[in-house]
Image: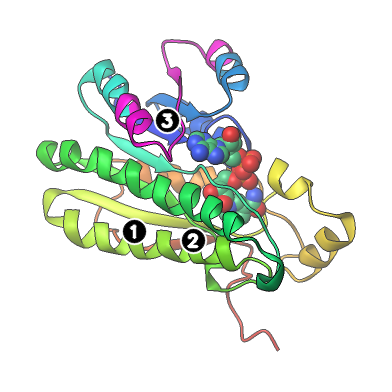
Amino acid sequence: MKSTAIVTGAVSGIGKAIAGRLVNDGFFVVLADLDEAKGASLEKEWGKDCCKFIKCNITVLSEVEALISSACSINGSIGVLVNNAGILSDNVIWKMDPEDFDRVINVNLKGTWLMCRAVASGMKEKKDGRIINIASRAWLGNPGQSNYAASKAGVVALTRVLALELGKHNVYVNAVAPGLIDTPLTRNLPEEVLKKLVEAQPTRSMGRAEDVAQVVSFLASPSTQFITGQTLYVDGGRSIGAGI
Ligand code: NAI
């Protein structure tokens, strides 16, 4: 029987590439997202024998619990959880509304926390599981992203704590920190801004969603052992160097 993997934010950008990659790796993938139309069309395209779309807002406890219970009904347990759903709402702090702070923290950090909490007991009891949290290089600090960077710093801290809490139960928890990746999220940036961001990259290029999926596939694989609590950067080298 296929092991079940849940991917949040699975119908767009990085999440879609991760979900597709895990389907190819042989997982049964539960596509969790808000977007029903895209979810239904992906389920049709990839086939009901390898994936299932479940509508879920990861910030709502009852929806998270219903998602986990439906996903468990497929083969009794969850092997892999990929917390990918995330949003942006950028501005310098003096122009940012408290609502923009709450919204971003709520999806990126609290939603990820609720999902981790919902799978932890099952993985602990089974003594098997992988949790992979999609953070961002922005957690290192990025002007205009006080809400987003704080949420992703929280995701890195959450990853490290859960690795400590769950390690003895054979549950590995890691984070992946993408840099500039070509997705609908970044395609919405003004052309000039995007140009400057690409020029600042050591590789002078953007990454592809598939580059992130490759690392998630590695961390989700049963043959990857003894790596937990880590944050792996997929950012074309942007996180290194003193920056002067
Ligand atoms: P995207 O905007 O293309 O996709 C995000 C998906 O999450 C959408 O399908 C959306 O419907 C879903 N979503 C949003 N709120 C949700 C909620 N409350 N419950 C369930 N689903 C929800 O974004 P992209 O670019 O693919 O980003 C994916 C992840 O990667 C995010 O966590 C983002 O912060 C992170 N990331 C992206 C980078 C980039 O350059 N694109 C760089 C670094 C990190």
- Residue 25: which numbered mark, if any? 3
Mark 1 is on which residue type? Answer: Thr
Could you tell me which secondary element the residue under label 3 belongs to? loop
The local crowd at label 2, few if under 14, some if 14 to 19, many if 20 or more residues have their Cα within 10 Å, is many
Q: Is residue 66 magenta?
A: yes
* Residue beneath disc 2: 152
Could you tell me which secondary element the residue under label 2 belongs to? helix
96 left or right of 219 in image: right
Quarter of the image where ligand 1 sits: top right
Residue in front for this viewpoint, 12 or 198: 12
Q: Nearer the viewer, mark 3 or mark 2?
A: 2
Mark 3 is on which residue type? Answer: Asp
Numbered range of the magenta stretch: 43-67
Whether label 3 touches label 1, CB < 8 Å: no
Q: Earlier in the sequence, mark 3 or mark 1?
A: 3
Q: Is residue 2 magenta?
A: no
Q: Nearer the viewer, mark 3 or mark 1?
A: 1
178 left or right of 224 in image: right
Q: Is mark 2 within 8 Å of ligand 1?
A: yes
- Residue 226: which numbered mark, if any? none
